[in-house]
Image (tube, rainbow, N blue to C red):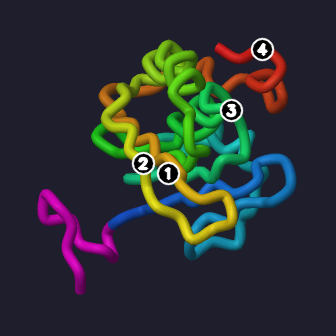
Amino acid sequence: MGSYTDGVHEQEMRILGACCWNHRFIKYPDSKRKSRGQSLGQNHCFREKFDIAVARAVAEMRVLAEYCLPLVRVGGLFIAAKGHDPEDEVKKAESAIQKMGASLLQVCSVDSRSPYGQRTVVICSKDRSTPMKYPRDPGTPAKEPL
């Protein structure tokens, strides 16, 4: 059994992998319930229940932050995979990240074997609870980013 920092063991970690919000359903581990990713943040069964939420580069960072961070518990992490040069996107997202109760922890480049080459990982730390008004209705974050 592998261990993580703070003595949290692998089997105790709850990780949500967010994939293609608009096209796939997300199934909660050990459950028969399924739901669209955009709706999970308002569901009390999922809200602030996960240690880590991971998102691929499927949307702009402000949108990902609004959908993913309400799912992360205080003290948890949100990890977003982005392209090779997301500095402007991350800078625009800082306000949205703060509104979700988080702070930007680290932005780091990673080598990738994909045809796209170097990628970037954006890591946010959840500092406080997300206000209940977030996430907004599905589609709103993409049409009217914070």
In front of the other: label 3 or label 1? 3
Question: Which residue is rendered at x = 45% and y = 41% of the image?
Answer: 122
SS at badge 3: loop
Indicate the amino acid at tag 4. Answer: Glu
Image spot of residue 40 (x, y percent)? 66, 44
Provide the secondary structure element on which disc 4 rests.
loop
In the rendered structure, which amino acid carries the disc numbered 1?
Ala
**Mark 2 or mark 1, earlier in chain:** 1
- Earlier residue among tags 4 and 3: 3
Label whose residue precedes the other's in the sequence (1 or 4) = 1
Q: Are marks 2 and 3 in contact (CB under 8 Å)?
A: no
Which class describes the residues within 10 Å of circle 1: few (<14), some (14-19), or many (20+)? Answer: many
- Numbered mark located on residue 53 in the image: 1
Above or below, comparing residue 11 to residue 18 in the picture = below
Tell me the element at label 2.
strand
The amino acid on which the numbered mark 2 sits, given as a three-letter code, is: Ser
- Asked which secondary structure carries label 1, the reply is strand
Task: State the residue position of label 4.
Answer: 144
The answer to whether marks 2 and 1 mark residues whose Cβ atoms lie closer than 8 Å is no
The image quadrant of residue 31 is: bottom right
